[in-house]
Image: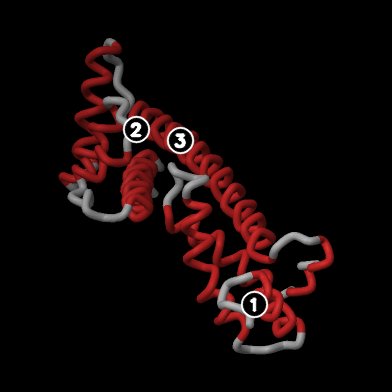
Amino acid sequence: MAEPGDSEHLLALHERLLHGDRIAPEELAELLLERLTGKIACQFPRTDIHLVYDGVADALLDFCAKPDTFDPTRNVPLDRFLSRAAWRNIANSVRGEKRRKAREVNAGEDEENKVVELCASVGNYDQNEGQLQQHRLAKVMQILENAVDRKIFELQMSGERKTEAFAKVMAISHLPMEEKRRKVKQAKDRIVAQLKRQKEPQA
């Protein structure tokens, strides 16, 4: 008799999936989701466990949707087949995360450049460069009525890039990193919008 989780049992689940058994996907997930997550997590020690979990879950869902992608005649156990699929999912996600972070860095630099350019465009005075810069900064501080926005702007002018530094000023350090990034970007965009409005000629 096949034991739960052994090759014979998994092959039986595969057959049930091929015949449209609606209970089989749940049984397969119960057998393999945690097991494969734990196994593959060791291969991605620096990766968020939730990303690993999602990669395994997606592999199981994809397989259950198309069970005919597995060919038992190739002598590859089903759990190994699914493990490979999950590994590919996670590797792709890791690469995507790296690209996303690189885009964020570039976008952050673009934001800082916009702020500096807009700051330089506020006011038009015939003074020496040092006095002009001080006047521009003072002018921007007057435009930014919100104290937190002024602190964010000061960090930007100092060349700060780390999300955590801005999150601390905004009192949102307790939030998850993705939420902090989103809120910090919103604050920077708000500052840019305020400076743009000031720059636009009044009707």
Nearer to us in this view, 27 or 75: 75
- In which quarter of the view is residue 162 placed? top left
Residue position for label 2: 161
Query: Where 7 falls versus 127 (above or below)?
Result: below
Instruction: Give amino acid for label 1.
Output: His
Residue identified by numbered label 1: 9
Mark 1 vs 3, N-terminal side:
1
| Residue 135 image point, x, y percent | 22, 24
x, y (%) of residue 2? 63, 79
Q: What residue sits 26% from the left and 55% below the top?
A: 175
Give the left or right position of residue 40, taking residue 2 as reference. Answer: left
Residue 93, horizontal then vertical, whole percent: 56, 51
Which disc is residue 105 wearing?
3
175 left or right, relative to 46: left
Is residue 188 visible to the viewer in this orientation of the structure? Answer: yes
69 relative to 83, above or below:
below
Q: Depth-wise, is mark 1 or mark 2 nearer the camera?
A: 1
Label 2 crowd (10 A; few <14 / some 14-19 / many >=20): some
